[in-house]
Image: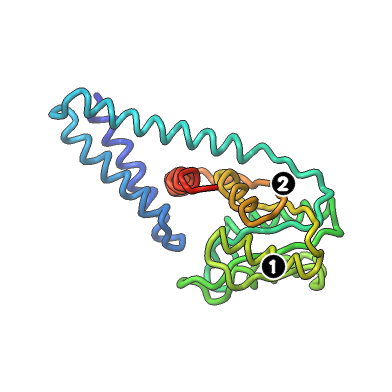
Amino acid sequence: MVRAILLGMALALGVNALWLAAVANLSLGNFLAGALAVGLLVWAFVFADLPKLANGAIIGVLAAVLVSSGLLAWYGSSDNVDYHEDAVIVLGAAVHGTTVSSTLQARLDTALAYHQQNPKAWIVVTGGQGAQEDISEAKAAATYLLSRGVPDGQILRDELSTSTEENFAFAKRLLDSQLGSRYRIAFVTDDFHVFRAERTARSAGLVPTHLSCHSPWYFWSANYSRETVAALWSLLQPS
């Protein structure tokens, strides 16, 4: 019975990881989802031969990942914007050729909804050009916003950043030039990413609130496996 459950989980994760590799840009999350599938497959065949202590440790690790994923989702979905921020920063996500991915589109649509409530706030789009992208994430994001009526003069573009840390650092540099040193920002990202992004924004010297969008279920294995590792690493770093 246990072996059948493990094989079923491994099959589901493996199919999901292969599908993501085919339709989405390559990422650490896709790799971790595939690695987890392989790990479950191996565990299924050696489960009966492992000592109870080893099986218990593996179950404990998996339970910890599930609990941490739940906490990340809960924290990320608890939005705290008040619509009086001076700017909203849209964190970068993949671009397919020149077209925004579904993840980036969800973030931009969330920023557009914010813009309707607070039309005076600057919108900062972030993200450089990745290996599988024909233009920068920021350029694709700006084009999307412009096509939906956001004035060009209200959009600031960071086309150089390659990480969340750089997203905030470079966005701060752009906002400092427009607003000086005293302002508040909101940032937009997926729910699973909010916890780490908020810590990163504060480390960059920003005063942040956050507005999240929900990650589609078929990205959960990749997103939460990656983010659990990244959040743990973030917590281990000096403040």
Check residue 34 in the rendering and tell me which mark sits there, or answer none.
none
Asked whether the beta carbons under mark 2 and mark 1 sit within 8 Å of each other, the answer is no
- For image coordinates 42% across by 55% down, the residue present is 20
Secondary element under disc 1, as helix, strand or loop, is helix
User: For the point 53% across and 76% down, which residue is it?
Assistant: 134
In front here: 181 or 168?
Answer: 181
Q: Residues within 10 Å of mark 2 (few under 14, many from 20)?
A: many
Query: Between tags 2 and 1, which lies in front?
Result: 1
Residue 219 visible? The answer is no
Judge from the rendering whether residue 190 lies leftward or rightward of residue 32; answer left or right: right
Residue type at mark 1 is Arg
Q: Is residue 175 left or right of residue 39?
A: right
Residue labelled with disc 1: 173
Left or right of 163 on screen, residue 139: right
Q: Secondary structure at mark 2?
A: strand
Amino acid residing under circle 2: Thr
- According to the picture, the residue beneath numbered tag 2 turns out to be 209
Between the C-alphas of marks 2 and 1, the distance is 18 Å
Residue 35 in picture, x, y percent from top left: 31, 48
